[in-house]
Amino acid sequence: MSADPVNIVCMKWGTLYGPEYVNKLYAMVARNMTRPFRFVCFTEDATGLRGEVTVRPLPPIAVDAPYEKTPWKKLALYNADLGDVTGTALFLDLDLIIIGSLDRFFDFPGDYCVIRNWTRPKDIVGNTSVFRFEIGAHTDILDAFHAQPTQHWVDEVRIEQTFLSRILHDQGKLTFWPDGWCASFKVHALPGGWKFPRLMLNWFRPSRVPEGASIVVFHGNPNPDDALVGRWPGAWYKRLLPARWIDDYWHER
């Protein structure tokens, strides 16, 4: 095993997620890595971030209004240069929970590794909550994005993960993590899932920790802080019991 630190990177912009999300993410990484790592947060506001977090400015990208603070901003990671952050990087969204080892995410082969999207299993589309890439190796993704106004891509593919999945698949560089490594809170932890009417089971049965997973992803709503107290923003039928097990993993210690 190499003694060189690996890169764990995240991004924080705007006010949707406070510094506690970054701090808890760092703590979860530290508890679930055996190899040395460097934890980097690209952000415009480092207020409240713990000292172990390496802070770097958000990489440049031209995202047109009104999409400046949407996940399209994540495409900035495909700049040719991210300053002193070089080599292989594992990107983690802020709104996820780490419940097992992350070492295997660096050992798994592939040019660009990403979650297979659970809500579109028949399509070749990744979920970019967790992906591994080589910094500077995918500048063509950012070039393609900048070649058209943001609205063009929103109209054509709607979200950034569909946009980049199409490019990487056409290049033969898209690899999905093995099933089960990354679990969806809504799909795998909730007893009734996320589709009506079966999701009404969530009113009466508690969520569970997905067995065998390393990461639980909270895509869309609810976020971890919502699920912890039994809150699911949205339609009246979207309810769940408090997911108390989240407290066992999602903390700054």
Image (cartoon, grey):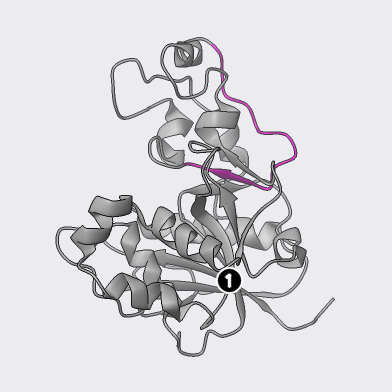
Residue 181: where, in percent of width, then height? 69, 47
From this view, report whether residue 241 is shown above or below residue 37.
Answer: above
Please give the name of the residue rendered at 31% of the width and 30% of the height, measured from the top-left corner: 233
Between 129 and 31, the residue placed more toward the observer is: 129
Residue 70: where, in percent of width, then height? 29, 57
Residue 113: where, in percent of width, then height? 62, 61
Q: Is residue 167 visible?
A: yes
Quadrant assignment, res 18: bottom left
Q: How many marks?
A: 1
Instruction: Decide: few, some or many residues near mark 1? Use Cα within 10 Å; few <14, some 14-19, many ≥20.
Output: some
Please give the name of the residue rendered at 71% of the width and 49% of the height, measured from the top-left corner: 178
Between 226 and 154, the residue placed more toward the observer is: 154
Q: Is residue 80 left or right of residue 147?
A: right
From this view, report whether residue 111 is shown above or below residue 83.
Answer: above
Q: Is residue 68 visible?
A: no
Determine which residue is flagged by label 1: 133
Name of the residue lying farthest toward the right: 1
Label 1: state its secondary structure.
strand
Residue 240: where, in percent of width, then height? 45, 20
Please give the name of the residue rendered at 41% of the width and 16% of the height, measured from the top-left corner: 196
Q: Amino acid at mark 1?
A: Phe
Please give the name of the residue rendered at 39% of the width and 69% of the height, measured from the top-left corner: 75
What is the quadrant of the N terminus in the image?
bottom right
Question: For residue 229: magenta?
Answer: no
Q: Which residues are magenta?
A: 205-218
Q: Main secondary structure of the magenta part?
A: loop
From this view, report whether residue 147 is shown above or below residue 197.
Answer: below
